[in-house]
Image (cartoon, rainbow, N blue to C red):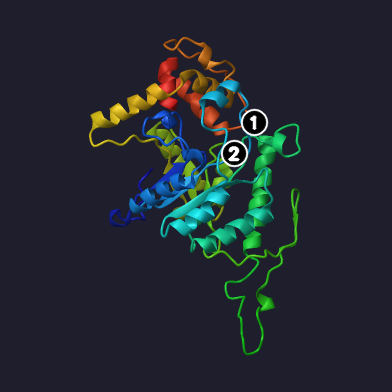
């Protein structure tokens, strides 16, 4: 990111957050000879990850989520993403198993209700002693599991998300920090002057309040946001504190950083209250050769056909990469494109293809 003249070099600090799939394992790593066969459903696997990250002084671990299953037979047969833990079940357990590390859970605004989300995060913030964060997102799919024949449109999802955020934060403000005076002598438990009833009446939600949970330790849990579409960036600038992004060039990363910070300032926020965290996938070794060998082994375990087919559907590419010769050039994507799932990832992949003109093999290696 760009240098900030208001922060001295002495005070600058790298923020480290670890992205952990709620399925417990990424890509082909489940096939590695040392990988546990039941790690995806074994809580001890997640506890071990949290222990390692905490010992390494990571600031936070971050769980993704989804509320649907890709029913493509190849994806089901070859990939480890058909089942996953609910992050809001994992976080309370990890809150009691750790002491310092931040715990961030994805909870969608599309197929949840604000009251439930506000209550759960308030309670987990107390369980953790003020270490919880909410990854504020919209769902990429799942309408079929929530009494719908379709998936809510992208623009509508973000409009709902904006109101969802207002309701959740309003509910967290139900009680002043010192509302519960608990005066034994007089018998007064609560100072009712320090209660705020929300009485929200909006387009998507009718919520009276107050929240029947104590105010979160942090006031508001840390808000993470990972949207890079125009709507996602607007929400990030307004509400986000930890902004996750995936960019393929330094120049793109710097442009994203400047845009988010400038947008936040225009909304009256202090840009320094937003931390932009670039997503990187790392392979660690004591030497370059050792790291390369680990990477090569994981790539050999990856199933190209299922991965390429999945990424073609995910980005609405218009053709199936898995049907092309592995060393052929990837055709240019359509000039006009749109998707109702992950717009920013679609643009990232399309831009990469146009910029680098990769072969199918090169694109596979870039994206896995």
Callout 2: SS? loop
Residue 180 lies, in percent from the top left, at: 61, 76
Furthest residue in direction bottom, as rendered: 185
**Closer to the camera, 38 or 61?**
38
Sequence-first tag of 1 and 2: 2
Q: What label sits on residue 66 in the rendered view?
A: 2
**Closer to the camera, 1 or 114?**
114
Give the CA distance from mark 1 to mark 2: 15 Å
Residue 44 lies, in percent from the top left, at: 45, 47
Residue shown at the point (67%, 72%) measured from the top left = 195
Name the residue carrying label 1: 340
Residue 174 lies, in percent from the top left, at: 65, 66
- Quarter containing the C terminus: top left
Instruction: Examine the image and state in which quarter residue 334 appears.
Output: top right
Determine whether 319 is above or below 272 in the image.
Answer: above
Residue 280 lies, in percent from the top left, at: 40, 37
Residue shown at the point (57%, 15%) measured from the top left = 319
Question: Is 219 on the left-hand or right-hand side of 340?
Answer: left
**Closer to the camera, 134 or 287?**
287
């Amino acid at each position: 990111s760009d240098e900030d003249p208001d922060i001295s070099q002495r005070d600058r600090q790298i923020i480290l957050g670890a992205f952990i799939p709620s399925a417990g394992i990424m890509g082909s790593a489940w096939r590695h000879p040392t990988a546990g066969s039941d790690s995806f459903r074994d809580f001890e696997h997640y506890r071990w990850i949290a222990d390692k990250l905490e010992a390494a002084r990571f600031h936070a671990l971050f769980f993704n989520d989804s509320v649907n299953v890709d029913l493509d037979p190849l994806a089901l047969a070859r990939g480890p993403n058909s089942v996953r833990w609910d992050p809001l079940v994992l976080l309370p357990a990890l809150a009691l198993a750790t002491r310092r590390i931040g715990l961030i859970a994805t909870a969608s605004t599309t197929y949840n209700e604000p009251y439930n989300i506000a209550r759960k995060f308030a309670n987990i913030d107390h369980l953790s002693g003020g270490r919880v964060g909410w990854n504020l997102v919209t769902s990429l799919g799942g309408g079929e599991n929530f009494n719908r024949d379709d998936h809510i449109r992208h623009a509508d999802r973000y409009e709902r998300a904006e109101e969802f955020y207002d309701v959740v934060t309003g509910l967290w403000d139900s009680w002043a920090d010192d509302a519960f005076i608990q005066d034994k002598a007089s018998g007064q438990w609560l100072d009712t002057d320090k209660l705020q009833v929300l009485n929200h009446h909006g387009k998507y939600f009718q919520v009276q309040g107050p929240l029947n949970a104590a105010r979160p330790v942090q006031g508001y849990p840390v808000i993470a946001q990972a949207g890079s579409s125009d709507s996602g960036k607007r929400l990030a600038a307004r509400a986000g504190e930890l902004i996750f992004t995936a960019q393929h060039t330094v120049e793109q990363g710097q442009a994203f950083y400047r845009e988010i910070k400038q947008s936040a300032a225009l909304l009256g926020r202090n840009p320094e209250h937003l931390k932009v965290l670039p997503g990187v996938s790392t392979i660690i070794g004591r030497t370059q050769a050792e790291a390369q060998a680990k990477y090569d082994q994981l790539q050999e375990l990856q199933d190209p056909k299922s991965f390429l087919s999945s990424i073609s559907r995910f980005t609405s590419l218009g053709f199936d990469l898995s049907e092309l010769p592995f060393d052929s050039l990837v055709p240019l994507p359509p000039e006009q494109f749109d998707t109702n799932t992950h717009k920013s990832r679609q643009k990232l992949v399309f831009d990469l293809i146009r910029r680098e003109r990769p072969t199918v093999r090169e694109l596979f290696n870039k994206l896995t």
